[in-house]
Every structure is written in structure tokens, then in C-alpha cells.
Image (cartoon, helix red, strand yellow):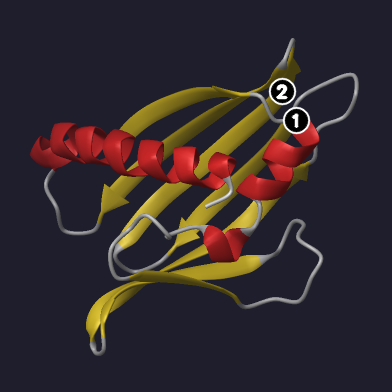
Amino acid sequence: MALFRIERRTHLSADEAWRRLTAWERHGAQVPLTRVTVTTPSPTGPGTVFVARTGAGPLGFDDPMEVVRWEPPRADGPGRCRLEKRGSVVLGWAEFDVRPVPGGACVVWTEDLHVRGLPRVFDGAIVRAGRLLFGRELKSLLAGR
């Protein structure tokens, strides 16, 4: 699997950064031809499922994810969320931590990603693409776009 980590600081409070990161429908806004749909009722917590659909019409794939850890930030500690990828194409997991720091918050996004059928020799390319793609996505989510 291809493991990568992205860290961003923001002027937002930890609570606001968490709120923006967990607005699941906004994920995918920076990914061409991708739409995210939450398939379980609110509020978000362990067991929440959402699907990122990438493609156009019948040419595409679904990337279903399930929230398996849900710990919003508290005054005395960071917030943590873990997603397990449950699809037939994209496998792995993603985690993010949101912790308060002087002047705002620090977000650390870690993802272990594998594309079914793609040999491990491509892991380096997946890591580079993941850092670029998810780095843009994280920036956009924190900016409120």
C-alpha cells in the first residue's frame, strides 16, 4: 500500500477545522469528476458511510468509506477520525487529527491507499499523486471552498 502524510496549519479553531473536514459532501470538490454522497443519516459517527463517485456516467467507480473512529476535538486534546475504504477498486484507510495550536489548529492527514490490481511498483506514483491531490483537497476544505 502507498502511505502518505500531509500536515497543514490553519488560523481556524480546532472545532471549525473539524467541522469543515467532516462536511463529507464537500470532499471531492478539487477532484475532477468526483461527487460525494452520504448514504447514512446524520449525525456523523462510527458507522457513517459515504461514497465518492469518480467518473462520468457508466465510466467510473465508487469509493465507499465508513467512519470507524470518531473523536471530535476537545479543549484538552486533539480530535481524531478514521475512515476505512470499503470499495472494490480503492482500498485502505485515511485518518486525520485536528489539534489546537497557538493561533489556530494543526491538521494531520494520513492515508494508506491501494488500487486493486495495480502492482506495488506504482506505490511511489500513488504517494506523489495522493500528496498532491489530497493536499489540494485539504487546503480547499480548510478555506471553506
Q: Check the picture and name the quadrant holding the N terminus.
A: top left
Along the line of sight, which residue is nearer the eye, 137 or 3? Answer: 137
User: In x, y percent, where is residue 59?
Assistant: 20, 83
Q: Quadrant of residue 30?
A: bottom left
User: In x, y percent, where is residue 108?
Assistant: 55, 26
Along the line of sight, which residue is nearer the eye, 107 or 71? Answer: 107
Q: How many marks?
A: 2
- Work out how far the residue at label 1 is from the one at label 2, CA to CA, in angstroms: 6 Å
Q: Quadrant of residue 126?
A: top left
Give the residue at mark 2.
99
Q: Residue at x 66, y 42 (%)?
A: 81
In the shown orientation, is residue 124 left or right of residue 75? left
Which numbered mark, 1 or 2, is in the foreground of this view?
1
Q: Residue at x 69, y 65 (%)?
A: 48
Please rate how many residues cluster around mark 2, counting C-alpha atoms within 10 Å: few if below 14, some from 14 to 19, many from 20.
Answer: many
Q: Is residue 100 above or below residue 133?
A: above
In the shown orientation, is residue 5 left or right of residue 48? left
Along the line of sight, which residue is nearer the eye, 129 or 69? Answer: 129
Q: Residue at x 31, y 34 (%)?
A: 131
Give the residue at mark 1.
14
Question: Which residue is outermost to the right?
Answer: 75
Can the viewer see residue 15?
Answer: yes
Along the line of sight, which residue is nearer the eye, 139 or 97? Answer: 139
In the shown orientation, is residue 93 left or right of residue 49? left
Question: Which residue is outermost to the top?
Answer: 102
